[in-house]
Image: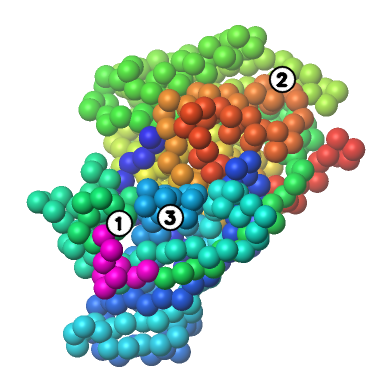
Amino acid sequence: MRFTLTFTLTLGLALAHDAQAYYGKSSTEARLTYSASVEIEHEGTIDLAVINRRGRARNAVFAKVDAQIQHLMGTFQSESFVEDFGYPGVLGERYVVSFKRVRSGSSSSRKILDYDFRGTVVFHKNAFRSRAVRNVPLKLPAAPDRIYDLGMVRGRNACTDEHYDTEGDFWYFWDPDKSGCPLRDDDENVLRVSGRLERLPNTRTTYPEYGRLYGDNGNGDAFEIAVFYGYLEDIESLRFPNRRDDGFQALKDTGRVLEDRGYELKGKLDAFREYANGGRGRGINYLWNYEKAVRALGRDVAVKVKLMLADTSISSDDVTFHNHLVPALEGADVVIYDGHSGLGGNLDLGSLPDVDFDPAKYQLLFFNGCSSYPYFNGMFFNAKDGSRNLDVVTSGLPTYGDTAAANIVAFIQGFLGGETETYQTILGRLERSNGENGTYLTGVNGDEDNAWTPRRPR
């Protein structure tokens, strides 16, 4: 599972970018609305009118409310939720909160806020079947700053994953009705409210902008694909690579597929590291560059594929990944990342070196990390000035290392031969490549304004 809890990111204060249409083979976007309350620590009075307006006061209060809302990430993928509701889902980054009332809390320094929630989520399509609207059971901590301690049993939190049970991490796998959790059937410390899910329309038949990808998209006659794999196991040394890691196996498998497809290895760097001063030494990173001339849309195109395996942690002392990721985000036509999402941290544009995006260049980004949907849509659409020149493919659920190479090959298969497939075809093949792991709730945002079709190729 590509998941590392090293970074906490606020999921959403407001609709930071215009809403994008969506398509997923097994998933669909939906509008979630509900009414709830939350108890927070807050000295002094809270002015209802003030916290319903943008500003410092609202942000301070909202951060505490958001600490409650983010527990839906755990709820929607938990075993007890799926048993009850039938299908998993994921909280999106686009939501708004309207405060209705402020009440006294359990002490003089605590307040209870009543609020209405409206936001976008992704759920399995089968959750709706013939219905466009249905109710969904929600579980929220009544007081998010106290809920962690209430789940402790013999020094460990029994209401979350046994490996990710620290106070900063547990909410991602939070399940108050998990066997052994002391909050099971607790209606005082766990709010149990009914939400309303309204399915949003999916796009039906859409294409990437092939006319631009296979044309002069800023790279002359070259079509550039950059694939970045991250190590999935804990990195013990920045000098000695772990060749047993699933990321290393994915790199080898993808390279083998490219060679089988007639791609020539043009350059290779193994077990290296780059330093901030421009030097290079022994390390754990791999860089393989492949190339092949293909015929696409009636012209010769040089398809160039960069494969890289690197330490992708945002807190790493190794700058090699960033040295190659930033130029790819600026110039490659298709950029793919397969590794830990770090709750959005590993590819957070605010934490990376400055990326000078070309707002006029069309690009396709695929983030195949755990629950990348809540983190990597708005951030990148904002950086590209909207969706006109950007499509973003993300996953809603945790993804697994044993399908890494299969996922990436399934996604780029058509591009390698200069084909022009619909997103519906691409995502269908990608879904099948998950094998027995089932769906990752993968989908694309931003494709609704693409103009290219076989009948209108320019």
Numbered badge on residue 84? 3
Numbered badge on residue 417? 2
Q: Which residues are magenta?
A: 184-192
Whether the residues at callouts 2 and 1 have beta carbons within 8 Å, the answer is no
Left/right placement of residue 122 relative to residue 216 reads left
Q: What is the spatial separation of the Cα atoms under label 2 and label 3, in whole angstroms?
A: 45 Å
Q: What is the spatial separation of the Cα atoms under label 2 and label 1, in whole angstroms?
A: 49 Å
Of 196 and 293, nearer the camera is: 196
Instruction: Point out the residue furthest to the right here.
Output: 455
Q: Which residue is mark 1?
A: 177
Where 82 falls versus 300 (above or below)? below
Q: Residues within 10 Å of mark 1 (few under 14, many from 20)?
A: many
Asked if residue 218 lies in the magenta stretch, the reply is no
Estimate the x, y position of residue 97 in percent, counting from the top left: 48, 74
The prevailing secondary structure element of the residues shown in magenta is: loop
Whether the residues at callouts 2 and 3 have beta carbons within 8 Å, the answer is no
**Three-letter code, disc 3:** Asp
**Three-letter code, disc 1:** Asp
